[in-house]
Image: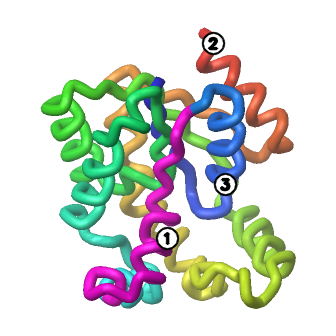
Amino acid sequence: MNIILLGPPGAGKGTQAKYLINAFGLKQLSTGDMLRAAIEESSDLGKQVQLIVDSGNLVPDNIMIELITTRITRADYKGGFILDGFPRTVPQAESLTEVLSQKKIKIDHVIALDVKLSSLLDRIRNRALEAAQEQRRQDDDEETLKHRLNVYKEQTEPILPYYEKLGLLKTIDGMLAPDEVSKKINDVLAG
């Protein structure tokens, strides 16, 4: 089973990805984790990614598609995967569909966590406060978060109709308690 998990920053995608990993034995492909790993490596690509992430902008499609394609074609991803944080634009969604089709890999479900954008800043502020300073995510800065929410609304939300037309989109209320969201996801996958 291959799943794309969508939602704005702070919607709980990481929490639900963990649920899916435990419940179904899927591999998580978190672009955020991949990008943070690239930054930690301090390679030329990592330094380029650092500048982009610090500004709150999206990493160029060619970089993301290359990173993702390399991962999902590995043997350990054959049992199923979760894409968390990708695609983020209609061109990325179209490119991903094309690349997966060429590799004969099918997306089974696209799950969108629907949350009130007005509630997200509070949720993310709490996440930042709870994290120890050394564990604080660089992208939890409030100005960066506001920018990321605007980028999501303008660039990522438009992919929902794309996946709806393909018959893959299922929308779940992400404002519910995390265990309730997990139950709703399980219901979608079961049936």
Element carrying mark 1: helix
What's drawn in magenta, residue-wise? 26-47
Query: Where is mark 1, residue-wise?
Result: 150
Residue 167 percent coordinates (x, y) = 38, 20
Residue 124 percent coordinates (x, y) = 73, 71
Element carrying mark 3: loop
Determine which quarter of the picture holds residue 141. bottom right
Left or right of 101 on screen, residue 13? right
Q: Residue at x 47, y 23 (%)?
A: 1
Left or right of 69 on screen, residue 8? right
Whole-angstrom CA distance, mark 2 to mark 1, is 34 Å
Which residue of the protein is positioned furthest toward the left in this rendering?
Answer: 102
Q: Inspect the image, locate mark 2, and give the three-letter code of the amino acid beneath it.
A: Ala
Whole-angstrom CA distance, mark 2 to mark 3, is 22 Å
Q: Is residue 66 above or below residue 122?
A: above
- Quadrant of the image for the C terminus? top right
Residues tagged 2 and 3 counted as in contact (Cβ below 8 A): no
Q: Which residue is drawn at 18% across and 32% down?
A: 103
Q: In this view, does 153 lie above or below 112?
A: below
> Which colour scheme appears in the figure?
rainbow
Q: In this view, does 61 lie above or below 59?
A: above
Residue 102 percent coordinates (x, y) = 13, 32
Residue 90 percent coordinates (x, y) = 28, 49
Query: Where is mark 3, residue-wise?
Result: 11
> Which residue is more in the foreground, 75 or 127?
75
Element carrying mark 2: helix
Q: Which mark is residue 190?
A: 2
Judged by depth in the image, the label closer to the viewer, 2 or 1, is 2
Whole-angstrom CA distance, mark 1 to mark 3, is 14 Å
